[in-house]
Image (cartoon, coloured by chain):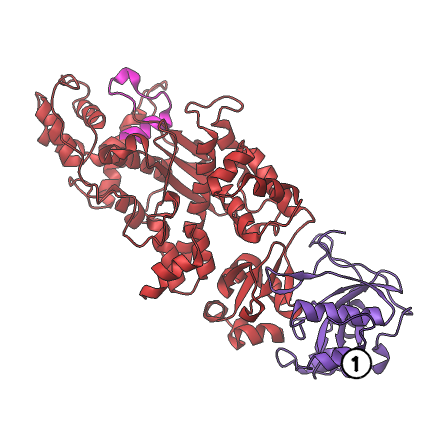
Amino acid sequence: MLGPGFTLNDFRAVYEPRPPRWPPDPVEAIPIGATSLLPPAPAVNVSLGRPKESQEDPGINTYLWVIDEAGIPYVLEAEWVELNGRPPKHTNLTSGGEAYVGGEMWFETNRALWVSGGSGRYHPASEQQLGDSVRVFEDFGYSVRSLGWDPEQGRARRHLEKA
Amino acid sequence: MTSGLRFVFGLGIDGPDWESAVKDCSWRFVRGGSELALYEEARNPTGHVLTAWEAWTAYGRDVIDEAIEYGSAVLRETKNATESCLSRRREALGITRQVLAHSVGVREQDVVDAETASRHVPIRTLEKLAFGLGMDERMLSFSADCGADSALAERIRILQGYGGGASVRISQEDAASLAEAASVARVHSILNGWLGYPRSGADVSPSDYFGNESGPEPGPSARKVGYELAEELRKKLELWGSPVESMRNLLTDRLGVNLVWAELSPIVAGATFTCADHEGNRVRGVVINSGGENEDVWTRRVTLARELGHALFDPDTRLRNLLVHGQLPEEHPGDIPVDLVDQRADAFALAFLAPRDEVQRIAPLPIDGSKVGSVMQHFGMCEAAARKRILSCYSGDADLPVAGSYAVPASDRTELESLVIDGSVPCSSRITRQGEFAVSVRGCLEQGLISDDSAAFYMDCTPADIREAWIKTW
């Protein structure tokens, strides 16, 4: 992990883009528009939410995100469901193409994020890559809390262990 | 069907033969404390690796789909699901943290940490605790009660003397052993189901009929009912007058009874219990003390026969989840157990081992020491049981020589009633995991239904032990 000011370009220089873990169905590759790129903080017109803590407390207003050549496309799951009648997939953010990494996020405020590496299609390859993703979000001006890495699974954690 | 499920399981997952698609799937899953993920070796996960079949049957299609789609699925039902479940269950059983820790082989501090969530406890340790408490370790954090049978816990607690009513008072260590035995029986039942083994080969049903000796129109006694049940079962099994060669094999191979050996206090001979798994299926099991008087093989056979009588014929209401027994009482009719349930089972045991006609043939009146010995030898029963059976075959009208005034033969059939089926137990596994349970674990491992991680967990050894003892020999 590099020092402060870890930019999107720094991330792209360190890591390789990769195709989704498995080929998407056609509807899973329907693109989302270019306006869905994460802007530098403060974000505008976002739905505030929080991550899942348990089945009983599933969190609200989950966004999917990826880092790809365009930037950081992101989408509010609930909004996509309302428009399309089904949940979005990370491949909807990439039109089924390559990305460096993906996950979930929640806006605590328009300047503060919770971030996870919860993506089966573009899962962080390592704890380090998840950490570097967080640094990119910070470089965008957001205060970021990561849900962290679970060594028992060898994957990014998807729930908030302790608030 | 989602593209993720299709990717992992193939097209067959949405067809009528979806079970085969799951069983044949080469992908694995890995369980952490609160989440389930698709397993990838390169990520070096340290959690419990499961086959696709194990994960699917435990958590269901939706959870599997979530794990594939998002990298992992969140299992935990509530924020403190694990810790509250473990502490609640331990207290319900009436055992201390120290006793639990010693029983399952972890540090007492691990129990404290698991119950308070004060620091991270590895999933493998949490699962050991859950299993040792008689819970379904797969359900840990996933369901509120972790598939634990609260009625069984209450019964175990009562038998320690809490709340009175315990005729055989068990220790906390016994309570822990019985809780673990319930887990073994539950898992054994599941594994046998996966292997396609029949649940029961006896074609008998529980019966709430214990005779009517003291009714307004006196009928048969509970003992007579027991004799009749034994005769009926012998006919069904086509034993006729022959001695039972191996009670152990009869229970496990022919009758499909879940048999668990345990180290219990000397006062405890055996127990029969019923418990529910997380899907509400009732599982019955028999626990036999590997020590105490059961160290004598012929005494062990009598204990097995008595617990068989309870397991096959006692309705759930009579079992009250768990019946614990001391050794058979002495032969004098005045000393017979008051409880009709025990009377019937005791009588069943003696008559099942030693049918009346054969006893009278081998030991015609008058009875001397050598005839008592002949009954013992022929039917493989201990002296106390043989004496009692002879008396019952002559309706109490037989003068027996004073016990101790004659030589008695030594027990044989050690091999046939051995605790271990063969030498294939992979390590110094605890006694509760030996016998037919080990055979079923190995069978499921061989068929790819469980992972070597799971096999190691069930056998209480390491995956390396499993590979060394079982996998390398295939």
**Image quadrant for the C terminus of chain B?**
bottom left
Q: Which residue is identified by label 1?
A: A9
SS state under label 1: helix
**Image quadrant for the N terminus of chain B?**
bottom right
Query: Would you say A125 lies left or right of B407 here?
Result: right
Q: Toward the viewer: B338 or B451?
A: B451
Display colour for chain B: red
Query: Which segment is the magenta one?
Result: B329-347
Query: Would you say B257 lies left or right of B176 here?
Result: left
Where residue B363 appears, as percent x and y from the top left, is: 10, 27
Residue B242 visible within the image: yes
Q: Toward the viewer: B442 or A6?
A: A6
The purple chain is: A
Q: Indicate whether B340 appears above or below A74.
A: above
Residue B395 picture quarter:
top left
Q: Chain of mark 1?
A: A
Q: Amino acid at mark 1?
A: Asn
Tally the marks.
1
Q: Indicate whether A61 appears above or below B301.
A: below
Where residue B394 appears, as percent x and y from the top left, is: 16, 23
Q: Please check the rendered image and state whether residue B436 is part of the magenta-colored stretch, yes or no.
A: no
Residue in view at x 62 percent, y 77 percent: A21
